[in-house]
Image (cartoon, rainbow, N blue to C red):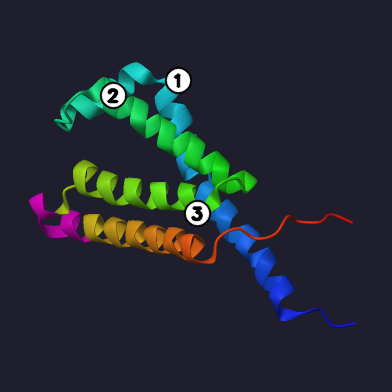
Amino acid sequence: MTSHPLRSSIHLLYVARLCLAAVFIFIYSGATKLVGWRDAMGEFEALGIPLPFLAIAATVSVQLFGGLALATGRQVRIAALALAGFTIFATLIGQPFWRVEGADLQHQLTTKLEHLAIVGGFLAIVAYGEAPPLKVR
């Protein structure tokens, strides 16, 4: 018996959501900032981010809730859109590649392109939305 192509696409959507949520980039990063709040304050202050306490609270909220929502399939479109916006904002604020030169510029540019790819994945999730519940037999 052959399976329907859409069925395997649905499984790929689950994998894509887990990779984006979890490769645990966002969940891990949010949890790390939550546990290491003082270190996060130093990092945000060094970047010159105004109201670092509020910025960290917003960052942790978006990373944890957005990552968990994607991983569990809850409010997937909203979570993906929030994480896409966060990724764009954090990339521009946290890593200003236009201020570096030479080999560091190449590294920074590669990192920015990787972040752009992650944003593209989030936008695909926004476009295609939630997969139906996964049935385990």
Give the extent of the magenta segment: 98-106
Under mark 1, the amino acid is Val
The mark that comes first in sequence, 1 or 3, is: 1
Under mark 2, the amino acid is Leu
Residue 24 circle label: none
Residue 96 magenta-highlighted:
no
Frontmost of labels 3 and 2 is 3
Give the answer, above or below, for where 29 lies relative to 137: above
Between marks 1 and 3, how big is the CA–CA gap? 28 Å
Residue 102 magenta-highlighted:
yes
Q: Secondary structure at mark 1?
A: helix
| Residue at point 57%, 60% (across, down) | 16
Residue at which label 1 appears: 35
- 80 sits left or right of 70 in the view: left
Mark 1, Cα crowd under 10 Å, few <14 / some 14-19 / many 20+, is: few
Residue at which label 3 appears: 77
Q: Residue 134 lies in what quarter of the image?
A: bottom right
Q: Secondary structure of the magenta portion, mostly?
A: helix
Residue at which label 2 appears: 54
